[in-house]
Image: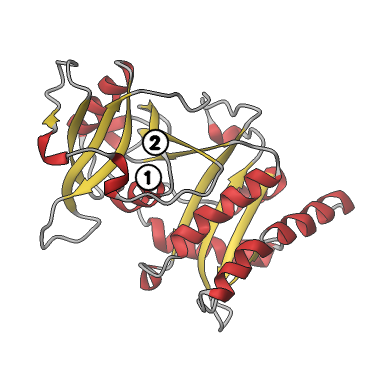
Amino acid sequence: MTAEMSGESTEMNANLQELQSEIVERGLGLHVRLADSDEDRARVKSLDDVAFGQHHGISLEELGEIHDHGAVVMFEDEQGNVVGETQILFEQIPALGRYKLAKNEAYAYGTAVDPEKQGQGIGRLANESQKVLARAKGKDTLVATVRVENYPSLRLRMKNGFRIAGYDPEFYGPLEEGGARAVIKSTTESVELADKDLGIEFHQVSVFDGQHFDQETYLVPVQFGDLVDVDANEKVRALLTAGYEGVWIIREESKESEQQSRGYLVFRRRQETITE
């Protein structure tokens, strides 16, 4: 690590102290810091492998490149176990493919939480760590890509101010092979939303039929989980092309798991555009 990179790491770790203060105040028993060493990043990869399973995870080479052009953040519990991690880019790298990062944007590359620690707020802290570091770098927009069928990730991000602003049908490969990704964007300001904040009576909203665009708001049915929902992907793409944006996500009450369940993405005609 060069002296310049070491200085940047020290500065970013200092930036993360505002988040560490929140963690201490809430009594969460976690420590947040950068994964600066090869050993740290190997531990981060191990957690990422568990969290993402068959879907596109992270390689050690990618983690090293992200470290060089952004940051890898890790959350450890009181025993020193890595229970959460997240990655952020401040500069373009080849792995971003066709997505071109604007000067005002930072890219939320990935986030993983120990499956046994789900529901403890670690995902929100990981998202907030990305925003803290992006603001410190002078960025005003945070960008990420996510599968349309990934309910936990979309729910977490949308509660923190993200909207579906774009779509790439072949970000990691063909749609039918799970390669498509929705492009989601948020400001780098801290936001925490709930259903009521949208001002939408969801039970009065029409289900999008894939052809008509005469309503201000539509629901897109989605089968959440590991399988590709081709119909949902095509409808998401159609609405985005017609000037709508994805603003919320709803899961139907059922005995199915959060990962394997049905629900809706909520799209509204775009009123204001997050910087493209």
Residue 133, image x, y percentages: 65, 49
Residue 1 shows in this picture: no
Q: Is residue 7 left or right of residue 149?
A: right
Q: Residue at coordinates 33% horizontally, 18% vertically from top-left?
A: 243
Q: Is residue 50 above or below residue 149?
A: below
State the image quarter where residue 167 is shown.
Answer: top left
Q: Residue at coordinates 56% horizontally, 63% vertically from top-left?
A: 44
State the image quarter where residue 232 is shown.
Answer: top left
Q: Residue at coordinates 42% horizontally, 24% vertically from top-left?
A: 272
Of 233 and 136, the residue lying toward us: 136
In the displayed orientation, state which residue is furthest to the bottom. Answer: 79
**Which residue position is annotated with label 2?**
163
Residue 48, image x, y percentages: 47, 59
Badge 2: how crowded within 10 Å, few (<14), some, or many (20+)?
Answer: many
Amino acid of disc 2: Arg
Q: Is residue 98 left or right of residue 249?
A: right
Q: Is residue 238 above or below residue 36?
A: above
**Distance in Å between CA atoms under marks 2 and 1:** 6 Å
SS label for mark 2: strand
Residue 229, image x, y percentages: 20, 37
Residue 244, image x, y percentages: 31, 23
Quarter of the picture holding the N terminus: bottom right
- Looking at the rendered structure, which numbered label has been put on residue 158? 1
In the displayed orientation, state which residue is furthest to the right. Answer: 3
